[in-house]
Image (cartoon, rainbow, N blue to C red):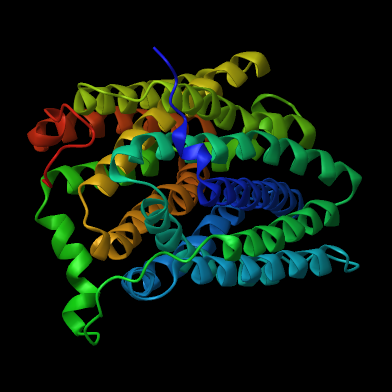
């Protein structure tokens, strides 16, 4: 079968993908460096979990407003401004680590500022993808976007760990550069054609994204499945402790460990961009989520570095498989005029499953211990997958990713 990569012939898609590569790289570099720095200074799982909470809280507060902004203003400009803010916060972290003694409170403050920027950037970025290509190309572009992000997430943590060995300031300086270049690339993307004139903002507009999702079981099930499965099963926030206490590894090995989920995601995402999912999308979604949970359980039982690397690869591969299905379903079933607000809610759920999941992981590890926390999370993910398959039969029975009519 000939491979059709026609989206790559679109220069705006290429600019977006390069920009995405840079900002995801910068985010991953900063995350691995902050994780090691916080744990090195505090030796506390609680302090490590607070990093995720600091990044997530602004998203929670700004969800409805940021989605409306993405529907009413130039999404390219929103992205560019947010990336500049993230670049400046990275420079602030450079200043902090160069001080004679590191205090963690300013680090949390900078992550709150960064969280505000991420809160606006997430809906704009998700909604902007649909402006770049025709509807029938959604699945391929989502696959390419996921692959690009995961390719960056492979090199980002490893580069962050390598740069940290050179000095704690180095990864944050590199992240700042990447954020600023990505901002410029976003502004080079052509402005989309103007839609019909917009009515003045009403209070109902702010909440319309929630109403839209609630009325569509396929979209609601897909978004909420991501929230609860990764919220419980995500163990990446505990990797600094896993590397130090279970695997007896240092910051360079931590960077490689952090890269393995992204490597699995990149490889499978690239495959899906060549061979998109065509049939039985719903059942494949729940199968991938179950595998994600079972692999998380295996990670909690592993004390071998190489086995843990393989498990993390499987975690990433199963995750991106479900991500491509969920994002394509949400994008294709949502009208463009609503995509910003729906993407904002989706971004909130993704943020909850990642940043808030990091907080949850830190708390459960502090309360019950490292291994029990990971095992409970994996079991919870498997249970969620089974429960959601029963609660959302239309999602389970969904065959094609992109259908001719909206659900």
Q: Position of residue 140 (x, y in %)?
A: 40, 34
Left or right of residue 332, residue 368 in this image: right
Tell me the residue at 41%/64% (across/down): 192
Q: Do we see residue 315 in this rendering?
A: no
Q: Is residue 78 above or below residue 271?
A: below
Q: Position of residue 249 (x, y in %)?
A: 75, 28
Image quarter of residue 236: top right
Image quarter of residue 305: top right
Residue 60 vs residue 131, the one in the foreground: 131
The N terminus is located in which quarter?
A: top left
Left or right of residue 402, residue 159 in this image: right
Tell me the residue at 52%/38% (across/down): 8
Residue 91 vs residue 178, the one in the foreground: 178
Q: Position of residue 58 (x, y in %)?
A: 46, 70
Tell me the residue at 53%/24% (across/down): 264
Q: How many marks?
A: 0
Tell me the residue at 45%/20% (across/down): 3
Residue 378 vs residue 205, the one in the foreground: 205
Q: Is residue 122 above or below residue 310?
A: below
The C terminus is located in which quarter?
A: top left
Q: Do we see residue 133 in this rendering?
A: yes
Left or right of residue 55, residue 260 in this image: right
Q: Position of residue 132 (x, y in %)?
A: 42, 52
Q: Is residue 121 above or below residue 68?
A: above
Left or right of residue 67, residue 23 in this image: right
Q: Residue furthest bottom?
A: 200
Residue 169 vs residue 41, the one in the foreground: 169
């Amino acid at each position: 079968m000939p491979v059709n990569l026609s989206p790559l012939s679109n220069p705006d898609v290429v600019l977006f993908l390069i920009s995405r590569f840079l900002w995801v790289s910068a985010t991953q570099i900063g995350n691995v460096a902050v994780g090691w720095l916080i744990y090195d200074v505090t030796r506390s799982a609680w302090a490590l979990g607070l990093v995720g909470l600091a990044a997530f809280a602004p998203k929670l507060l700004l969800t409805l407003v940021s989605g409306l902004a993405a529907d009413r203003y130039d999404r390219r400009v929103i992205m560019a401004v947010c990336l500049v803010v993230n670049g400046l916060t990275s420079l602030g972290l450079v200043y902090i680590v160069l001080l004679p003694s590191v205090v963690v409170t300013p680090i949390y403050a900078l992550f709150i500022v960064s969280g505000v920027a991420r809160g606006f950037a997430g809906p704009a970025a998700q909604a902007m993808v649909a402006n770049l290509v025709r509807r029938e190309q959604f699945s391929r572009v989502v696959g390419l976007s996921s692959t690009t992000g995961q390719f960056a997430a492979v090199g980002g943590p490893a580069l962050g760990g390598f740069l940290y060995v050179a000095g704690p300031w180095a990864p944050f300086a590199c992240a700042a550069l990447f954020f600023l270049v990505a901002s410029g690339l976003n502004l080079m993307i052509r402005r989309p054609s103007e839609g019909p004139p917009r009515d003045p903002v009403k209070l109902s507009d702010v909440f319309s994204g929630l109403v839209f999702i609630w009325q569509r079981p396929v979209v609601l099930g897909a978004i909420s499945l991501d929230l609860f499965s990764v919220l419980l099963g995500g163990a990446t926030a505990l990797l600094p402790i896993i590397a130090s206490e279970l695997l007896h590894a240092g910051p360079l090995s931590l960077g490689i460990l952090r890269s393995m989920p992204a490597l699995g995601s990149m490889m499978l995402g690239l495959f899906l961009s060549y061979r998109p999912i065509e049939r039985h999308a719903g059942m494949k979604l729940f199968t991938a989520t179950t595998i994600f949970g079972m692999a998380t359980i295996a990670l909690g039982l592993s004390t071998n570095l190489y086995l843990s690397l393989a498990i993390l690869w499987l975690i990433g591969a199963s995750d991106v498989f479900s991500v491509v299905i969920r994002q394509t379903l949400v994008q294709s079933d949502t009208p463009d005029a609503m995509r910003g607000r729906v993407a904002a809610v989706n971004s909130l759920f993704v943020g909850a499953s990642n940043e808030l999941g990091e907080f949850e992981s830190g708390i459960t590890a502090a309360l019950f211990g490292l291994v029990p926390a990971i095992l409970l999370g994996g079991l919870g993910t498997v249970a969620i997958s089974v429960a959601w398959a029963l609660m959302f039969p239309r999602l389970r029975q969904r065959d094609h990713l992109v259908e001719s009519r909206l659900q």
